[in-house]
Image (cartoon, helix red, strand yellow):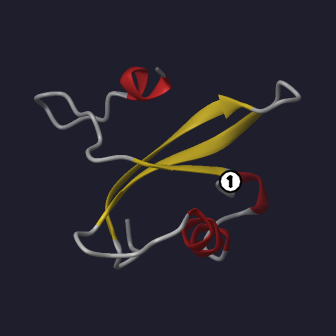
């Protein structure tokens, strides 16, 4: 969320090809901004511990949230 080109984001755990759980980020870009998955992964890698590095990025239009403002991770898993 501290990246200037990111409007909103959420991270969930997903299984990779080996069955190991890895972090996957869902990112909403700021309007009229070119942002790649590599940009996001490099930015996060510079801020967190190695095991927390984002391994996959998916760009979406909006993060699903409840009326209380909580991220609906179950909707992101679909």
Task: Please tell me whether residue 67 is drawn above or below residue 33 in the rendered image.
Answer: above
Task: Please tell me whether residue 50 is drawn above or below residue 63 in the rendered image.
Answer: below
Q: Nearer the viewer, residue 60 or 69?
A: 60
Q: Which residue is found at the position 10% from the left and 29% from the top?
A: 67
Residue 2 located left or right of residue 55: left
Q: Which residue is found at the position 23% from the left and 33% from the top?
A: 65
Q: What element carries label 1?
A: helix
- Looking at the image, the residue that sits furthest to the right is 18
Q: Where is residue 9 in the image (x, y as percent from the top left)?
A: 38, 53
Q: Which residue is found at the position 61% from the left and 34% from the top?
A: 13
Q: Where is residue 76 in the image (x, y as percent from the top left)?
A: 42, 29
Q: Which residue is found at the position 68% from the left and 53% from the top?
A: 52
Report crowding for label 1: few under 14, some 14 to 19, many 20 or more residues within 10 A (C-alpha).
Answer: few
Q: Mark 1 points at which residue?
A: 52
Q: Which of 72 and 57 is in front in this view?
A: 57
Residue 37 located left or right of residue 16: left
- Determine the image quadrant of residue 63: top left
Task: Please tell me whether residue 47 is drawn above or below residue 74 in the rendered image.
Answer: below
């Amino acid at each position: 969320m501290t990246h200037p080109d990111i409007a909103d984001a959420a991270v969930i755990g997903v299984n990779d090809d080996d069955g190991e759980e890895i972090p996957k980020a869902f990112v909403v870009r700021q309007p009229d901004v070119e942002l790649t998955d590599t940009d996001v992964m490099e930015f996060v890698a510079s801020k967190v511990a190695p095991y927390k590095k984002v391994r996959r990025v998916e760009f979406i239009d909006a993060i699903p949230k409840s009326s209380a403002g909580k991220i609906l991770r179950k909707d992101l898993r679909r």
